[in-house]
Image (cartoon, grey):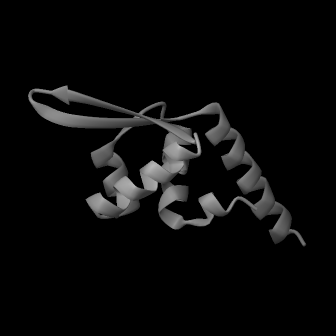
Amino acid sequence: MDKLLFNPIRLKIISSLINKSNCDFNFLKEVTESTQGNLSIQLKKLKEENYIEIEKTFSNNYPKTSCRITDKGKKKFEEFFNYLIKMKNK
């Protein structure tokens, strides 16, 4: 089992990114019901393992962070989901 995705916030992040090609920081903050600091930490962990890519830009002098899932992230999410189904059917 993928322990990285066992964390509820990281799982919500990956689940959101599976359904959308790109999500911004504020959207993920709302979806995960997380604080800004905690979300940043969880995004960093996912990025370090190459589950997501993070792009930081500026829009009207405001920082903008957007995330997208990588092929590895998609694969790991599918494996995690299949593991859960397998455990449920035991």
Could you say which is closer to the camera, residue 32 or residue 39? 39
**Residue 61 relative to residue 50: left or right:** left
The residue drawn where x is 72% and y is 55% is 80
Frontmost residue, 59 versus 32: 59
Tell me which residue sits at (53%, 45%) in the image. Answer: 48
Q: Is residue 35 left or right of residue 18?
A: left
Q: Is residue 11 above or below residue 58?
A: below
Position of 87 relative to 64 (above/below): below
**One can see residue 31 in this view:** no
The correct choice, above or below, for 28 with respect to 85 in the image is above
- The residue sitting at 85% across, 63% down in the picture is 86
Specify the quadrant of the image occupied by residue 69. Answer: top right
The quarter holding residue 89 reads bottom right
Q: Which residue corresponds to the image point at 55% horizontal and 66% vertical from the top-left?
A: 7
| Count of numbered labels shown in the rendering | 0
Residue 19 drawn at (x, y percent): 53, 39
* Horizontal relation, residue 16 to residue 37: left or right: right
Is 76 displayed left or right of 63 in the figure?
A: right
Across and down, in percent, residue 24 comes to 33, 39
Give residue 73's quadrant in the image.
top right
Task: Give the percent coordinates (x, y) of residue 11.
Answer: 55, 57
| Quadrant that contains the C terminus | bottom right
Given the current orientation, which residue lies at the most extreme right position?
90
Quarter placement of the N terminus: bottom right
Residue 45 vertical placement versus 85 (above, below): above
* Residue positioned most to the front: 48
Whether residue 51 is visible to the viewer of this picture, yes or no, is yes
**Where's residue 35, x and y in %?**
29, 64
